[in-house]
Image (cartoon, helix red, strand yellow):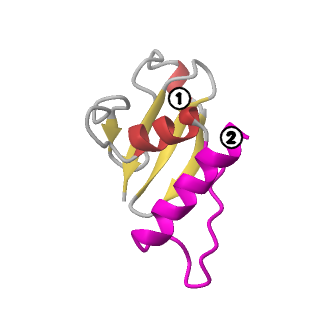
Amino acid sequence: MRQHVQRLRVYYLAVKKGLASPSHELDIKWSEPFVVEWLKILQVPPFEHAYPVRSRGSRCGRCPEARNDQPTVFTDLNFPGGSKMRCQACGAEWIERD
């Protein structure tokens, strides 16, 4: 029952603060790792330096120049204003702003 009470409290708080939908629906299933990852991507303090920010079309900053001759960059996700990139060779991650 404790879990029910906690969820009822969160629901009540969301409705009271106007954070629920107009029909008072509330569906949040976010985990702590999910929230922390988005805080890093959006560079919300204290996570503003979690990922380096590079210009659009950047190459990996960790791989040697010889490896950078081949395109090994993967777009992990796009968000309004930028993208999170990952090097397929070494796994380095960074943010590219639009």
Give the amino acid at mark 1.
Asp
x then y, percent, for residue 49: 28, 30
Residue 70 among magenta residues: no
What span is colored magenta in the figure? Answer: 1-30
Q: Residue at x 63, y 28 (%)?
A: 88
Q: Is residue 2 above or below residue 68?
A: below
Residue 43 at x, y percent in the picture: 32, 42
Q: Earlier in the sequence, mark 1 or mark 2?
A: 2
Which residue in the structure is indicated by mark 2? 3
Left or right for 19, reference 90: left
33 sits left or right of 83 in the view: right
Determine which of the numbered discs, if any, sits on residue 69 in the image. Answer: 1
Side of 66 where 95 appears, left or right = left
Task: From the viewer's side, name the closer residue of 73 and 14.
Answer: 14
Q: Who's the residue at 43% across and 70% down the image?
A: 16
Tell me which residue sits at (62%, 66%) in the image: 26
